[in-house]
Image (cartoon, grey):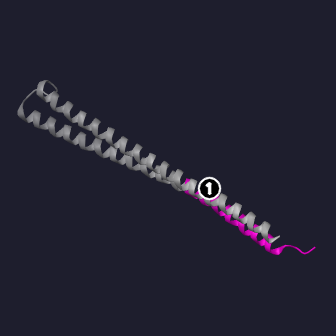
């Protein structure tokens, strides 16, 4: 009985294609994790910058209040400080919301790419097996 070389070659090609798809899925997942890591770094940087801006603004307000000769942290001066702190809290809230939305976007894109690659791997496997069967 002759060896069905064509069927063996088709089977090997299909296996390599399937393994390539699996490796691509692994690479997509790794890339997604790096994107999330970079997003977390960006979120931390933005939070640090917002805190620094608020610290500088509070310091400037205290200096101006001291120069005016008013009692600091009472009455309208306390309201000024509270407004800066509230603005900082709002800024940090929106930084966190933006980071959360970015991570969800990364997850959504990853899910779509993984589904597409799984479809390609499955259809490649089925097509290869069918073609190998026909070659025998």
SS class of the residue under badge 1? Answer: helix
Magenta span has 23? yes
The residue shown at (56%, 53%) is 29
Position of residue 26 in the picture relative to residue 44 (left or right): right
Magenta span has 83? no
Q: Which residue range is magenta in the image?
A: 1-29
Examine the image and state in which quarter residue 81 appears: top left
The residue shown at (42%, 50%) is 39
The residue shown at (22%, 42%) is 56
Residue at the extreme top of the image, as rendered = 74
Across and down, in percent, residue 51 comes to 29, 41
Residue at the extreme right of the image, as rendered = 1
Q: Quadrant of the N terminus?
A: bottom right
Position of residue 100 in the picture relative to residue 88 (left or right): right
Q: Quadrant of the C terminus?
A: bottom right
Residue at the extreme left of the image, as rendered = 68
Examine the image and state in which quarter residue 21 appears: bottom right
Q: Nearer the viewer, residue 65 or 51?
A: 51
The residue shown at (54%, 56%) is 113
Q: How many marks?
A: 1
Across and down, in percent, residue 120 comes to 62, 60
Position of residue 119 in the picture relative to residue 133 (left or right): left
Q: Nearer the viewer, residue 74 or 35?
A: 35
**Mark 1, residue position:** 118
Examine the image and state in which quarter residue 118 appears: bottom right
Secondary structure, magenta segment, majority class: helix
Across and down, in percent, residue 100 comes to 41, 43
Q: Badge 1: how crowded within 10 Å, few (<14), some, or many (20+)?
A: some
């Amino acid at each position: 009985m002759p060896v069905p070389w064509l069927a063996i070659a088709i089977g090997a090609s299909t296996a390599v294609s399937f393994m390539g798809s699996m490796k691509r899925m692994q690479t997509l997942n790794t890339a997604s994790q790096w994107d999330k890591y970079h997003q977390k770094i960006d979120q931390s940087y933005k939070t640090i910058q917002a805190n620094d801006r608020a610290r500088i603004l509070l310091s400037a307000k205290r200096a101006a209040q001291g120069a005016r000769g008013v009692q600091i942290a009472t009455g309208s001066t306390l309201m000024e400080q509270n407004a800066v702190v509230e603005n900082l809290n709002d800024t940090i809230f929106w930084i966190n919301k933006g980071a959360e939305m970015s991570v969800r976007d990364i997850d959504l894109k990853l899910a779509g790419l993984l589904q597409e690659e799984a479809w390609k791997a499955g259809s490649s496997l089925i097509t290869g097996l069918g073609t190998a069967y026909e070659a025998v």
